[in-house]
Amino acid sequence: MKSFQSPRGLLFAAVAGIWCFAAQAQELPPGADVKSLLAIAREKNPEYASMRYEAQAAAERVTPAGALPDPRLRTELMDITRGGEQNPTLLPSNVGSTRYTLMQDLPWFGKRDLKRKIAEFEAEGSHGKVRGTWSELAAKIKTAQAQRYFLYGNEKLTQEILDLIVRLEKIAQSRYANGLSAQQDVIRAQIEQTNMKNELIALESESRQVNARLNALLARPATAPLAQPEKLRTLPVPGQLDAAALEERVRTRNPQLFTDEALIKAAEKGRDLVYKNRYPDFNVGIAPVQYGSAIKEWGLMMEINIPLQQSSRRSQEREAEAMLLAARSRKEASANQVLSELSENLAGLEAAQRTEALATTSLLPQAELTFNAALAGYENGKLDFATLLDAQRQIRQARQNQIKAQFEAQTRLAEVEKLLGEDL
């Protein structure tokens, strides 16, 4: 008997399968690579969100800064008793006369534009702070992910060495049983295993601490699961690490320098605005006068403030000049610090790359050859167990140097990208 399935049933099964696969994919914890972690942080980190909202608020201040003040309406009821002929009244049609004055404040020419420019530059500064917050947050995540990879690699290496020591213990036990070596060799192997197990406990504890810090950056519970890191980010090629080119990029794109430059421009406009205060502001108005129920008179009004307090204004001008000089000095200090950190991290990145290359191409192969020779010599009774353990430790040290150099290179790369405000 042939089975038959309708096209509708097949379609339903396919959709259900796709839905189950998608749901399973969504349940996978993040952490396999940096990209997934950065995406979560960009969406959920509260500090970054607060800086974005502050920048949004600063941008909303631009329009009010350049707007005219609201007009004012004044109502004056004159002769509310009509010379004592009636009781006091507040009805405009029953008093002697009513004056309505509509007034508008007008700042001196150019003041509104300067206020708007100040608000714009302050908004740019807030945007620079957003970029700086993200660069710092991204660097922390990249460093934490590199540390997770370092700890994970160290844990794997320690477990491999532990398995190796177990095999060496069996060899020592066999030789001891045959009277070819002392019992001390077995005891040394067991002590070495205990040390390895203690190191595994320490690595596991440190991994949990790093995971908790990373989850905090992602606004997740401290114990939320994270996937094991699969690989490190690819390091830039030497051409991308040219010091002169990176220095120029830092000068133009560093978030802190961008913010400082915006604050300098705001201080310059603030100084210009203070100098504009030497000139008076205006207040104009129109005033219809009501008699009974009809408007029979019209008046015009203009007033100005008289800038007589010159000593006060000169102090304000000197303050504005000092604030401008302070903003320029602050940017110069920031530039010196940023360029110094860039040079330091580039040197550290180069050293880490050279160390990794040396460990991979020279130190590790030599250590493996030494261990293999020592193992053969111990099995043949030509070397003692202590020499074999020393050879094993050399392999471990070489691999640890390799992993540590990779971690150092990733940390330095994250710092360089933080200074640039963007990925290389």
Image (cartoon, rainbow, N blue to C red):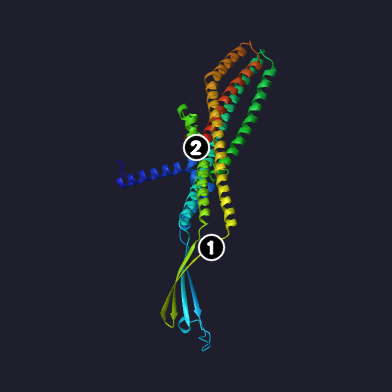
* Amino acid type, label 2: Arg
**x, y percent for residue 120:** 47, 51
Q: In which quadrant of the rendered view does residue 154 lie?
A: top right
Which sits in the foreground, 11 or 224? 224
Which corner quadrant holds the N terminus?
top left
Which residue is found at the position 67% from the left and 18% from the top?
Answer: 185
Identity of the residue drawn at 58% across and 50% down: 318
Q: Is residue 298 above or below residue 156?
A: below
Look at discs 2 and 1 and give the one toward the viewer. 1
The disc, 2 or 1, on the residue closer to the chain's N-terminal end is 2
- In front: 46, or 108? 108
User: Mark 2 and mark 1: span between their CA atoms?
Assistant: 45 Å
Query: Which one is nearer the viewer's eye here, 168 or 1?
Result: 168
Categorize mark 1 by other alpha carbons within 10 Å: few (<14), some (14-19), many (20+).
few
Q: Could you tell me if the residues under marks 2 and 1 are in contact, i.e. CB atoms within 8 Å?
A: no
As drawn, the label of residue 358 is: none
Look at 58% across and 22% down and name the residue there: 398
When the figure is inspected, residue 99 is found, relative to residue 275, above or below; the finding is below
Circle 2 SS class:
helix
Residue 84: percent from left, percent from top:
53, 88
Judging by the rendered image, the residue that carries numbered circle 1 is: 306
User: Residue under circle 2?
Assistant: 251
Q: Amino acid at mark 1?
A: Ile
Residue at image position (50%, 33%) is 247
